[in-house]
Amino acid sequence: MADFLRPISTITLSDRWGLVQRHEFEFRRRNGEWQHQIRETYDRGDGAAVLLCDRADGAVILIRQFRYPAFYRGESPYLIEVCAGKLEGDDPETCARREAEEETGYRVGELIKAFDCFMSPGSVTERLTLYVGFVDSPAGGAGGGLHHEGEDIEVLRLPFARAMAMIESGEIADAKTLLLLQYAALKRLLS
């Protein structure tokens, strides 16, 4: 037990798609006061994501796929994203390479680790490892994702400047994609 947290109970609400739990605890505030709190967490495991880049023509390879939560909110359900997936027992680098090939058909050569991050730490336990990967040749595989995982992925090849403009226009709104495109811009990985 931590000196700032006193667990009271944890109840599993669902474990079908991911593990959703309700946690009741007492939390010691900075002023020393103990406060009763209730939180829910959603756990599907950790993942990795990779921004695919082609230095030869300054392009990025992104994907577009249906996302039910965006549809549920009444927003465009087809989000533009970098390749990403669950670790499924692999290390993050292996996962990033696997997902890139499954989703786009491209094999990754050089891979640069950008950072690890939490995307929504108020309730989601997932920690993502983010990479920038470079491709040297045209896609060798079909891409499109895995049918048995419900994936139906469109592969997009865009000039880097166009992808950056799509952040400003709101066409790209996925957090991991925003972070990786900004990282590539700050590090001047593409022109």
Image (cartoon, rainbow, N blue to C red):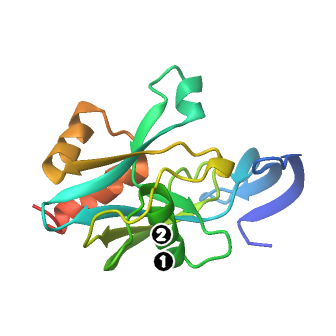
Toward the viewer: 27 or 175? 175
Q: Say which quadrant the N terminus sits in.
A: bottom right
In this rendering, does residue 117 appear at all?
no
Badge 2 amino acid: Ala
Q: Are the residues flagged by discs 1 and 2 in contact, CB closer than 8 Å?
A: yes
According to the image, label 2 marks what residue? Answer: 96
Task: Indicate the position of residue 79 as horizontal and vertical percent values.
Answer: 43, 37
Q: Say which quadrant the C terminus sits in.
A: bottom left
Toward the viewer: 1 or 47? 47
Q: Is residue 62 left or right of residue 188?
A: right
Q: Check disc 2 and report its element: helix, strand or loop.
A: helix
According to the image, label 1 marks what residue? Answer: 93
Toward the viewer: 154 or 25? 154
In this rendering, does residue 133 appear at all?
yes
* Residue count near mark 1 (Cα–Cα under 10 Å), binned few <14, some 14–19, many ≥20: many
- The vertical placement of 116 against 154, above or below, is below
Q: Check disc 1 and report its element: helix, strand or loop.
A: helix
Residue drawn at the location 48% of the way across and 45% of the way down:
153
